[in-house]
Amino acid sequence: MTAYETTATSTPLVSVLIPAHNEADHIAGAIESVLYQKTRFPVEILIIDDGSTDRTAEIAESYASRHRNIKVLQNKAKKGKGYSIRRAYNQARGRFVHVLDADDIFSNWDKLQRQVDILRRRTDCFAVAHNTLFLTQDDRVRIVPGCTADTVFRYTDCHQNKFYCHTSSYLFRRLDTGLPAYFERETMRGDTALFFFHAFATRKSVYVMKQVMSVYNIHGQGIWTSLDQRAKDDFNIAILRDLQTLVVQDPERPEHKSLEKRIDWAEKKRLAAVTASDALDFRSGDELVRECERTAAKIFLPEIRARAFQAMYSLPDVDTLMETVGRTVLLREGFHLAGRRHDARKVVLLVSGFVPNGGGVFREIKEIVGELLSSGFRIDILSSGKIDTDRKIIDAHFAHPAITYRQVDRAGSLLAQIGEALRFLAEAAPDRIYPFITHHDVVGLAAMQRGLGREIVFDYVYDHGLSLGVHSSAIDRIVAKTHTQASALAPVIDPSRIVQLAPFFTDRFDENPYRPLVNGILTTASAAARPYKVESEYRYAYFDVILSALSAVNMRHIHYGPLSPDVVAEFLDRLRAARVPEDRFVHIPWADDLGGSLLRSGVDLFIAPFPICSARIGIEVMCCGIPSLNHRSSVPGLPEAGDFVDPVQPGWTSPEDLIVSLSQMNATRLQALSCSTRAYFSAQNSSSISLRRFVDGAFDAPQISPYPRFTLDDLALEPFFDSRIAEERNNGSAEGRDSRPASVSLLARDCRPAGDSRPAEDSRPAEERAMYQEIEQRPLKFWHRTPNRRRVRAAFYWFLRRRS
């Protein structure tokens, strides 16, 4: 692990102040959460030991001796937290300043960089904050309610107490005047005084991010948590009165009156003996993780999947919250980053399970494993068990002396499963971790933690739907396969983390095996591992287009992959009605060797599936030298087949274009296209080149377009994902996403579809199988549900292409 440290001549941009008194059990976690932040600027850490009688000072000095950007200040005696903060604040050199209690942590490694970027951009803001996970000793948790969208709170909102964020979340613009002497008073030591002082001094706004990026540890030993409710009320009133007297001073100012209202409310609460237990606001950690899982699993509900699969989405709230949960579990295991050593010849594949016939991901994993073995690596495969995997699959595909397979015990609680996965990874200490987690595998997501491996390399295998985990700050590199993927990720992921490498496939042929028109009739084919990729009710329905082509061109078409029986029967009826011979359409439900079957069947031209393409299949087709005909989507919310294959291959926009292209195919043109696609594959996609570079980490810099055709949108903010948002927008809400009730939180919502009165059920393998079966049986509807903003984006993209 490395940290961006100050040098003898550099000036830190951010100063993080860590006041500490008898925090030997926690301070290492706090220091490391700052020390290993991923920043492009220097950070200084000022630790103020306030007369500790345990090993707090010793631990702090041990870090300071190894890192020049850490300075330990020793109070001669216990002076109190306010004194310690003021002393460090007035010595800080950073343009921005952050206070972090020694028993709390930053749980996101991009936190400071993201906050600084916002403060640099938003000169109207004096601070940036975010949501926080509150954690008790018995694993009960809560997050700050109402933080459901990034929001800018005006100065009036600040002094009227319209929102709350915890100390561990605030990055302030440091005031040149420093903190005055009254901050040494007991009432001025906490977050309320520090926040109000900066607000009053600047009269500016606060930017609040909705993601959880810090942890407030409630262990009963802190000054605040050790007080009973009555004492807390009394202390709050004393704080507010001192703010009136010391900071505002003028009783005619609106800030003074706002504070008076808060005092009146606090006194009425005290007189009424209101002692609402904080426990009512907390839930078990396992319940929170389960809710994250259910939120992500909504992608499989047919009415949501129909819309979500027309674009690419992520769930940043779930990603950051589960990363935070995993970090807390890891710290409770006693894990620290300092002095961590990794096995340079070992890698870990973190998977949800294996489905050999589930698409291209399984084959990609097998190729990566094969190349790692040939390079002399030992491989541990850790499965969360989210996807049931028969032991026979492991024995058939991964039986090797250098491979160890282990599956998490799913009989325990979700927190227990996360703990088991983390212990395994900590013990393995691999050089690299390669995650391949499914759309709702929160256990695998939480196990993606920085420091467990030397680096985490995220192979971006998603081409539609939900990309779970991409917002995890533990990821060191995200490997995009095309410039369109990289451009879609760049607006929401730090571009410095994105790398690019062409998809890879093992070349089985010494020379081009393709021969055109061997059947004496033009033979085309399409393939899709999942029925929904071609059964969707898109503007140009797959079976409508194929029927038109068979009616207009003397050809035969083969479809590879499962199809719904009713769909096949209906299509055959339509062929008969159109007087097209039935033998012109062939359905092959599955082929273990797709490329070999295409060649044996004499396929002349591959019509890439639409509206959802398959990158892996497209690469295999190129390996066989088979030309392809690729759809250029009129509503580009997804990657297109043309993004992955030889750019010389023809494309079509409308069915008429497709029929014209098919009519123009002859042996000469087909052979020329074959030579081009085979040459492109050999130069770009052959495993001897691309896979070798993947294992060596020799990635390319991404080609990021300033005008991406699509971006990775937040699925939780889509109206079809949350009925409350849809209702607000239908009622004419101008704010849309930001106008939700303050009490509504993404992870507090019922994740069942609107109108479903059934009790919520746990996501277990048997239920998942039933859910998948239901999904496969229901057709998806694309075109008429396409959001208007994507049509505008499509028109803009079309205009740019015309100009170029």
Image: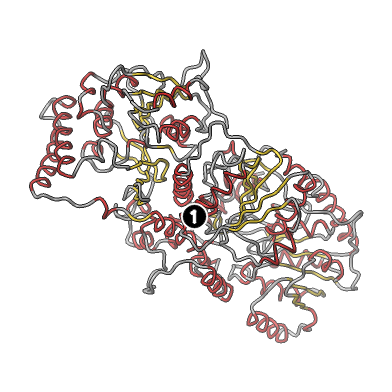
Residue drawn at x 59%, y 68% as measured from the top left: 538
Q: Position of residue 503 (x, y in %)?
A: 72, 50
Circle 1 — which element? helix
For this orientation, the residue located farthest to the front is 54
Q: Is residue 24 left or right of residue 654?
A: left
Q: Is residue 259 left or right of residue 592?
A: left
Figure quadrant of the N terminus: top right
Q: Residues within 10 Å of mark 1 (few under 14, many from 20)?
A: few
Q: Is residue 84 left or right of residue 472?
A: left
Above or below 340: residue 625:
below
Taking depth in this image into account, of 355 and 593 the one nearest to the observer is 355
Q: Position of residue 62 (x, y in %)?
A: 48, 24
Q: Quadrant of residue 544?
A: bottom right
Figure quadrant of the C terminus: top right
Residue drawn at x 24%, y 19% as measured from the top left: 180
Taking depth in this image into account, of 474 and 470 the one nearest to the observer is 474
